[in-house]
Amino acid sequence: MERFEGLLAVVTGGGSGMGRELVLGLLGKGARVAAIDINADNLAETASLSGDKAASLATFVVDVTDRKAVEELPEKVIGRFHDVDGVINNAGIIQPFVKVNDLGYPTIERVLNVNLYGTIYMTKTFQPHLLGRSEAHIVNISSMGGFVPVPGQALYGASKAAVKLLTEGLASELAGTGVRVTVVFPGAVSTNITVNSGVKGFELPADQQQQRIKILSAAAAAQIIIDGIERDRPRVLVGSDAKFMDFFSRLNTVGAGRMIQKRMGALLKS
């Protein structure tokens, strides 16, 4: 997907936040987009924002954790657009800011189902169709939390670390085919992921709000991702914090974890 004009991209989590901005950004590049989300109202709002690109957008209300519903998607998408050139697995949720010991199994399963199994279902379902194209792309959104531990987000981090290795494994398996693979590591991005995740009462401590880490807008993050896809980059780091922690964690894994613990530990609920 080096050039987007006329190509069809499937974007999960397209109803809000970074997913919405990916949808709008791709439409602006001349792509056709199938936006997937569990929330019909959010998808309708994305559609209303597409303006004169509305004819190039189709929306599908689907829960990515529902394997049967996901497996029915290609027929619907290809029925609407006749082909598919790429999948961006963006849908994701965080966990409440509590220790693993205090997480209930329903929450654990929901995080893993959305972040990991949703990505697996979408990838396995669409990969045969992508392999039929001369060129195609799979993009999986991991997280900075997928390579550096965040206290109170251990299960979320585990799910995103799994997405990282899944994507890297796919890249190896698909070498020599026309399907390119990209894994994305966003740092701090301004989205409504806490609301969509059902996480209440989340707020950075006052002394943390003044830190120098720049929180990117969802639109800026989406543009970095789109640029990375255009450049066929296997890894895309989104934000100065993600870039720094990627470097620091390679240099000193334990030290990077301690730094995050000192900065984020206060978020843990007692």
Image (tube, rainbow, N blue to C red):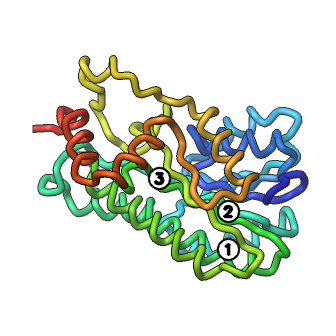
Name the quarter where the C terminus is drawn. Answer: top left
- Residue 152 seen in the current view: no
Element marked by disc 3: loop
Q: Amino acid at mark 2?
A: Val
Q: Which mark is residue 92?
A: 3
Q: Of the numbered discs in the image, which one, if any, rests on residue 87?
A: 2
Instruction: Measure the C-alpha gap from mark 2 to mark 1.
Output: 8 Å
x and y percentages locating residue 219 in the rendered image: 63, 33
Answer left or right for 62 relative to 103: right
Q: Are marks 2 and 1 in contact (CB under 8 Å)?
A: yes
In the shown orientation, is residue 122 left or right of residue 164?
Answer: right
Judge whether 176 appears above or below 116 on screen: below
Q: Is residue 97 left or right of residue 166?
A: left
Q: Tag on residue 126?
A: 1
Specify which label sits upstream in the sequence, 3 or 1: 3
Asked whether residue 206 is in view, the answer is: yes
Helix, strand or loop at mark 2: strand
Disc on the earlier residue, 2 or 1: 2
Is residue 249 toward the left or the right of residue 129 in the image? left
